[in-house]
Amino acid sequence: MQGMNSTLRAGASLVRDYLVLVMIAALVAITALVEPKFMHPANLVNIMRQFGPLIMVSLGMTFVIIGGFIDLSVAGTINLVAVVTISLIQRFGQVPALLIGLAIGTVCGALNSVLILSSGALTQAEALFLTFGMSTVYSAIALLYSHGSTMHFWDISGSKSIFEAIGGGNVGPLSVSFVIFLSCLAALWVFQEKTVEGRAIRLTGGNKTAAHLAGVSVSRAIVLIYTIGGFMAGVGAIVLFSRITTAAPVIGAGYETNAILAVVVGGTTLKGGKGSVLRTVMGVLLVTLMSNCLDLLNVSTYLQVAVKGAILVFAIWLDNRKQD
Amino acid sequence: MNLTAIGVSLFRIVTRQKAFVAILAMLVGMLFSGTDFYTAYNLLDMLNSTSILLILAFGVTLTIISGGCDLSIGGILVVSGIMAIKLLDVMPLGLAILLAVLFGAVFGFLNGFLVVHQKTEPFIITLGTGLLLTGIAQQLTDAHPIPAKNPDFMTIGNGDFHGIPNLVLITLVCFGLAYALMRFTAFGRNLYAIGGDYDVALYSGINVIRTKWMAFVISGAAAGLAGVLLSSKLNTGSPVYGETTALVVNCGVVVGGTSFAGGIGGIPQSALGLLVFGLLDNVMNMLGITSYYQVMLKGAAIVIIIWLDCFNQKLKREAV
């Protein structure tokens, strides 16, 4: 009797821990039954492409949240990186444009960490408002730089093969953006699991005072999480505008909440200290599949925003229950 | 007194009274601008356009003093504004307004349940409920502004009483009510106590859950009222207005001196804090600054102000 009870309890906690996986499986099964188009190869390729930008941003956001902070500036960073990179392709060539784009993302992230460190902000709330302000500043710079206009691929007369490949090319059965995702995931997973810095980030998120007393450099961890967050937002921006072949200075709107949603749904706790990039992959998969299912079921994009909000609230509530 | 000491004390004044210093700086600066800034018309217009933000801020101040925060007000603002216009078609004016405000209160009750009863992180959870409402607002209007057909409804937000705009008068009444609530009632004192130290308040016999919950209900109702007034002023219900309003209002409250640490601040401080943003908008328009630069200056102002607030907290922590 005792044994069965504990087995039940273990089973229940397993379901709770991997609720996301259970939900993905249920969602895929239901949609595949209701809408046969879902399992069509063209749709699966479509999902793989939709997956691209959000997963990059969310992987970066994972470290910020594990470190016990939050980053609302990714929307501004994406806007800025996208408009600057696309405008530089013709002037400087593809590779320099790509590198400058990534550098801008990294600098934006590092700048956030400088602000947070210099002000001595410790809580998620303080970081939330500081990065919101920075997002507004980055977006304004993007607007000023582009004069508010949208730039298209066909405006570029020079070669843009790299970006066309990122947006629509394939390597064997996989899309190029998926390969980029796999390499980023591998690198970040090794960073998270196998390096001292990865552990320092986790300790910082768990308890800053304890981490400091244990000899962990909390400042270094904060610089790292935001810089990685900014860099990954830059990668996300490039994948995004390559896929849709245009870059507007408002292209990144909504990515900050979607990334937080994906990370939390994946099971990384907002309280910091616990979580993994692998969990975020599951979270993004669920969010992307859900959008795709709702599209196929003809739910309006507006109602989808409401559904996302409801799921975000539910996921945070569940995350909070797990802590007790 | 050497120069460093003067510098330090100046810095303290700026960080503590940042709203007052900012307003003073702008007022003095505009003396030399040679614009029509110092006219009764312009100053009333500035107050009129800040009034919606002020009403929102009075509600939010309660939640921040109790140690929380409310980022869903932007969502409540747009949904209740749209609701009022939709309900006007089927029922009398008063009832439609009442129901729209009630919607705000009910949603505030839900926020309170999640934050206070279920003990979730207020910053993130109200961001989520705000997102939910933004989606609902877009669905209700198909993401287009919808016009109001009742002329009486329009006069609420656009009429005036002996030259003073109705919105300014309504804001003054709200200010008086909120100030009295926080200054002279047990409820207000208890909110300060809860924000100051939750456990001490609990052991002092304050019904912490009910009091803090009530703060969220009031914040929701204030946002509902602000939504009705905004729709009336624009004579349309639009789902786009609320996107950054919530963050700007919460920042404005902090600018005034109500801290995210809880237990500190008040309604007059929040009014000053929001006036900084109202004045900033007005000054930038007067000086003919283009809209992209306006966005940038506003963002920079938010960063600087929140930075100062955090830095002040850090100094306090280190002084202990």
Image (spheres, coloured by chain):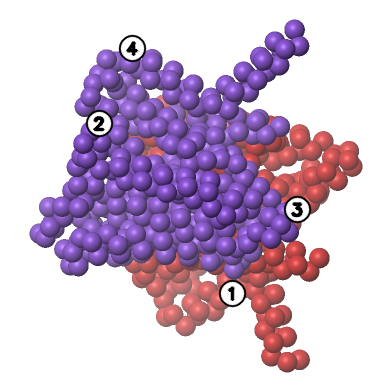
Would residue B129 appear left or right of A155 to someone viewing this image?
right
The Cα–Cα distance between marks 3 and 2, rounded to whole angstroms, is: 53 Å
Image location (x, y in percent) of residue B26: 53, 74
Q: Residues within 10 Å of mark 2 (few under 14, many from 20)?
A: some
Image location (x, y in percent) of residue A260: 49, 42
Q: Amino acid at mark 3?
A: Gly
Residue on which the image places disc 2 = A45
For the residues bearing labels 2 and 1, Cβ distance under 8 angstroms: no
Element type where label 1 sits in the image: helix
The Cα–Cα distance between marks 3 and 1, rounded to whole angstroms, is: 26 Å
| Rendered shade, chain A | purple
Of B147 and A40, the residue lying toward us: A40
Residue on which the image places disc 3 = B263
Q: Amino acid at mark 1?
A: Leu
Which mark, by number, is residue A33? 4
Q: Residues within 10 Å of mark 1 (few under 14, many from 20)?
A: few
The Cα–Cα distance between marks 2 and 1, rounded to whole angstroms, is: 59 Å
Q: Is residue A5 above or below residue B45?
A: above
Residue on which the image places disc 1 = B24
Element type where label 3 sits in the image: loop
Going from the N terminus, do you reach mark 4 or mark 2 first? 4
Going from the N terminus, do you reach mark 3 or mark 1 first? 1
Q: Residue furthest top?
A: A1
The Cα–Cα distance between marks 4 and 3, rounded to whole angstroms, is: 55 Å
Q: Residues within 10 Å of mark 3 (few under 14, many from 20)?
A: many
Element type where label 2 sits in the image: helix
Image location (x, y in percent) of residue B57: 60, 51
Of A117 and B186, the residue lying toward us: A117
In the image, which is nearer the foreground, mark 4 or mark 2?
Answer: 2
| Rendered shade, chain B | red
Count of numbered circles on the image? 4
